Image (spheres, rainbow, N blue to C red):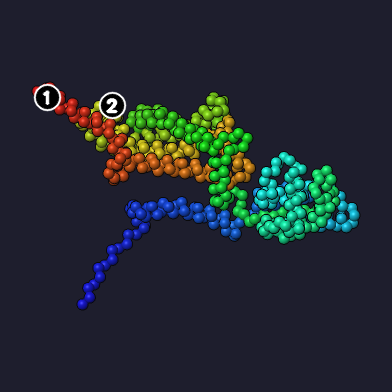
Amino acid sequence: MSETPPPKPPRDPWFRIRTNLTGRRRAVLMILSFVLPIAIWSLATYLPAFQSEIKFTLVTEKIGNSAAFSVGDRIDKEYFSVYLDQVRDENKAILEAREAGDAKGSSRANKKRLRQLMPLAESMGVMDGVPQDDFAAVDGKLFSLYGSLAEGTATVSNDQLTAENLEIVKANWELLKEFAPYDSKNFIKTPLLHLLPQGVSSSPVFLPPPHECLIAAWDDFTKEPANQQPWMYERLLGSLKVVFGAFLLACLIGIPIGLLCGTYDFFAKLIEPFTDFFRYMPAPTFGLLLQAIFGVAGAPKIAMVFIGTFPHMILMLGNTTRQLDRGLLEAAQTLGAKPRALFTKVIVPGIMPRMYNDLRVLLGWAWTWLVIAELIGEKTGLTAFIDTQGGKYNFDRVFPVIIMIGIIGFLTDQILQWIARGLFPWEYNTQGGFISKIVGLPGRLLSKIGKKEEAIIPAETA
């Protein structure tokens, strides 16, 4: 008779009210919390269904009432088709004017049309070593490239130059070759045809794909900024000084006041009503006032983050202090503890874990005020970079900085949480680790000294 297999242990459900998940499941969900937004971002930028714009790789000069575009600009796909038709109509008008014998052009206008090939020439390395301010040399290289493309000695892919544009190059070369070799003072005046604008399917300008953001971030951190602008790490250090400087100042003043408000009703009724009123005032409205008081350098920025953090710190710490178990105070008073001992040996140690968490939250709050603060007076730090590049629609350079701020804040919070597990193991149901041993060393030494004194006093009495 076969033995009945033992019943399988019940599966631990993922959804249980007020029950912690296992460590592995928590780790999986934490990873997914970051992977899912990145996946959604990638889908929205790489799938053709979501790519609603065309990013120019080759542009033409201004045609009629149309806007003037540069390489890298984006336009809606529907308008791109209209724009192509406008250029084709303009080329048709040029051909008709040639046939009628009344075509009017200039060598200057034709040189501009020659320069339409500049992006292609740069991608092929034709312009390597050519000074960009030497227009005669630049145009000479482009003239040679025109001939190479028309005669087939230089080959390009359809993505680099469409078949329709290649035919236009050949048609223009039939006129240009009469002026070879290139001479900037003796150049064709008969109007040349415009190359048609080209582009690649792209996500909207405000949502650059991840790989473009990574490339831009690498360039911003490794390449020397133009016009003697600060390096990215210098901007980052400046922003860190504003956030942590203001937060430490708020802690130095706010922690004692918050503890007093939570301990003594006298201070609570004296300080908290106005603080509660003041915290509803938008901190940015004090920008001009802070600038008038502290100038336009770093001081008003620190003051702004301070104003945005300090009132909330007083109220949060006061409330946390009042939540201390009253039984602890009554027990200490029964044992003869004086008011000073109640404050230093019962209240402060008793609220320390919750106060630590409050300060963690408030540090994150300080980061949210950074962007507003750094716009006061002289724009500095990471915010100045975000503001400048955002105004130019270079969002591939803006996103990495925003993400970097988030990463710094997240890592700081995770480190503080890790330290908390060592400082307050009883709050996390964990054994005291390396950190708690280091931090608790002074307390253990004082405890041993106290025990020795207690042993000496009875001996002396005897």
> Residue 246's spot in the image, x, y percent?
46, 31
Disc 1 element: helix
> Residue 100's spot in the image, x, y percent?
90, 56
Residue at label 1?
A: 459
| 56 relative position to 278: left or right | right
Which residue is at a point 18% across and 28% down the rendered structure image? 452
The answer to whether any part of residue 396 appears in the image is: yes
Q: Farthest residue in the right direction?
A: 101
Disc 2 element: helix
The image quadrant where one finds the C terminus is: top left
Say what amino acid the circle numbered 2 marks.
Arg
Could you give the CA–CA distance between mark 2 and mark 1, rounded to whole angstroms?
A: 29 Å
The answer to whether any part of residue 82 appears in the image is: no
> Residue 236's spot in the image, x, y percent?
51, 37
In this rendering, is residue 102 above or below 407? below
Q: Farthest residue in the bottom direction?
A: 1
> Residue 381's spot in the image, x, y percent?
54, 35
Specify the label residue 407 is tagged with: none
Residue at label 2?
A: 340
Q: Nearer the viewer, mark 2 or mark 1?
A: 1
Which residue is at a point 60% across and 59% down the rendered structure image? 48
Q: Decide: few, some or many residues near mark 2? Use Cα within 10 Å; few <14, some 14-19, many ≥20.
A: few
Which residue is at a point 80% across and 47% down the rendered structure image? 182
